[in-house]
Image (cartoon, helix red, strand yellow):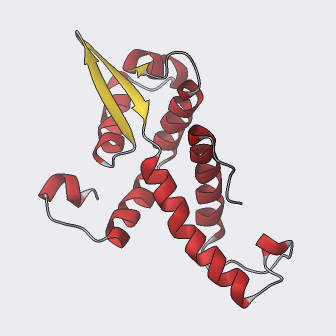
Amino acid sequence: MLALAISGKRRTSLELMADIFDVLSDETRRTILQLLLESSSSASPEVSVSTIVGETGLSQPSVSKQLKVLREAGLVSVREVGQHRLYRLDAAPLRDAGAWLDLFRAERSRRDPGSRSSGGKTASPLPAVVVNLARDLGAAAADLVGKAPWR
């Protein structure tokens, strides 16, 4: 996981996308991302580790470990203020993941005009959990940048 940050090797976009979905597969990391998303529209979009600990009930070492993974994946940025670290959501990788999934939706819609995107209930070419997670994350990222969700 996260070979780009660890090895420094150049990765293909599909490998990077796999890393993003791997990072998003963890419920704790999704909880932290949700907390950062909720704070992103506030006057202070940065969140301290202690705030995340208080909101999630996780231990400080656990939160710090998950934030490191999110940071290495490019999903959060950090700013140091004295001894405190303030984290902020970086929605760009989520938009990229949504755009990648849109390619599949567009192809599916082209081949099957009765697909879910057109109101039908046909099966998805991707596992439902991936489609649902990507749709939700994509909508959240779109909200962050002021664009309409691509559902």
146 to 62, vertically: above or below: below
66 to 105, vertically: above or below: above
Q: Residue lying furthest right in this view? A: 119
Q: Residue lying furthest top in this view? A: 82
Asked whether, in this view, residue 35 is left or right of residue 7, the answer is right
- Residue 95 rendering spot, x and y as whole percentages: 51, 54
Point out the image quarter for the N terminus.
bottom left
| Front position in the image: 101 or 83 | 101
Asked whether, in this view, residue 102 is left or right of residue 64, the answer is right
Q: Which residue shows up at 16% across the image and 53% down it?
A: 6
| Front position in the image: 120 or 59 | 120
81 to 37, vertically: above or below: above
Q: Which residue shows up at 58% across the image and 64% down it?
A: 130
Q: Which residue shows up at 77% across the image and 71% down it?
A: 117
Q: Quadrant of residue 10?
A: bottom left
- Residue 65 rendering spot, x and y as whole percentages: 31, 35
- Residue 142 rendering spot, x and y as whole percentages: 60, 47
Q: Quadrant of residue 124?
A: bottom right
Point out the image quarter for the C terminus.
bottom right
- Residue 79 rendering spot, x and y as whole percentages: 29, 23
How many numbered marks, from 0 up? 0
Asked whether, in this view, residue 24 is left or right of residue 15, the answer is right
Q: Residue lying furthest bottom in this view? A: 111
Q: Which residue shows up at 56% across the image and 41% down it?
A: 145
